[in-house]
Image (spheres, rainbow, N blue to C red):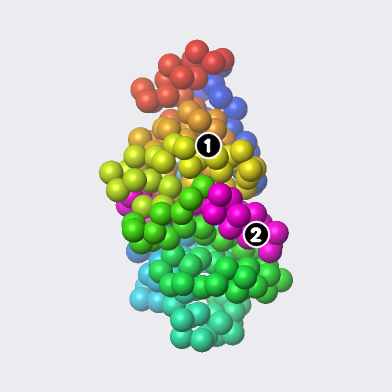
Amino acid sequence: MLNYILKNVPVRTEKPRDHGLTMVMDKGLSVREIEDLLEVAGPHIDIVKLGWTTSYVTPNLSRKLKVYQDAGIPVYFGGTLFEAFIIRNQFDDYRRILDKYGMKHAEVSDGSIDIPHEEKCEYIRKLSEQVTVISEVGSKDAQKIFAPYKWIKLMKAELDAGSWKLIAESREGGNVGIYRESGEVREGLIDEILTEIPKDKIIWEAPQKDQQVWFIKLVGTNVNLGNIAPAEVIPLETIRLGLRGDTFNHFINSL
């Protein structure tokens, strides 16, 4: 619900949405902080990631998950937790953990460890029989720079294996993967990916405001964006709607 009428505002998809997603990174919010966040920003949050392996050390994890779930907001464990189980040969234990906590989504990634890609796709296939799979493409190692054709090849294979959405890696800092160390977007890489991969299938990790603005201007109001800090959910929604200086003229001129 919006508080008043403004003409010629970009049209957002409605929840539950398949695109135009805002994925929030929860790096250790308390139950009370989540309740406060949802009171203000709940209508604009589509899915929440409990960052990397924070769920392993979070007190009252079940209570925390229930707050999100009761609000109708899907939540999932970060891909690093998946990798932590895999490197220890505990895949079946990981699957049991998903069931134990009533998880409906899971992330499959290989940003911290090397997994042969066919093996990674097999994990996607197996998990997709149990939950909705989001797979992450790209490395957390700034020295590993993939050519565009390789990003496209990996993304296509993971979609074929059963991924619902693909996350384009940037870490929570937004300085690896699809970005240079400075945080600048690798524009040529993004352009090439979008020639082969449907835009609605990709969640672009974009923790920095300039990155969010860039993708909204390129793809549109309903681009999927991830790794959004809790305090940035409302600001991001105003950027999507052309109601912040960064996109104000962009949308006024196109409406």
Q: Nearer the viewer, residue 232 or 30?
A: 232
Examine the image and state in which quarter residue 139 appears.
bottom left
Q: Is residue 251 above or below residue 232?
A: above
Distance of mark 2 from mark 1, alpha carbons? 19 Å
Q: Is residue 217 above or below residue 211?
A: above
191 vs 179, left or right, is right
| Residue at image mark 1 | 191
Total numbered labels placed on residues in the image: 2
Query: What quarter of the picture does the C terminus occupy?
Result: top right
Q: Is residue 62 above or below residue 249?
A: below
Q: Nearer the viewer, residue 133 or 234?
A: 133
Q: Secondary structure at mark 2?
A: helix
27 vs 133, left or right, is left
Q: Is residue 193 magenta?
A: no
The three-letter code of the residue at mark 1 reads Asp
Q: Is residue 167 magenta?
A: yes
Mark earlier in primary sequence (2, 1): 2
Residue at point 65%, 54% (across, down) = 156
Q: Which residue sits furthest top?
A: 253
Q: Residues within 10 Å of mark 1 (few under 14, many from 20)?
A: few
| Residue at image mark 2 | 157
Query: What quarter of the picture does the N terminus occupy?
Result: top right
Bounds of the magenta span? 149-175
Q: Nearer the viewer, residue 15 or 194?
A: 194
Examine the image and state in which quarter residue 80 appears.
bottom left
How far across and how far down the image is residue 160, in percent?
70, 59
How far across and how far down the image is residue 43, in percent?
52, 43
83 vs 117, left or right, is left
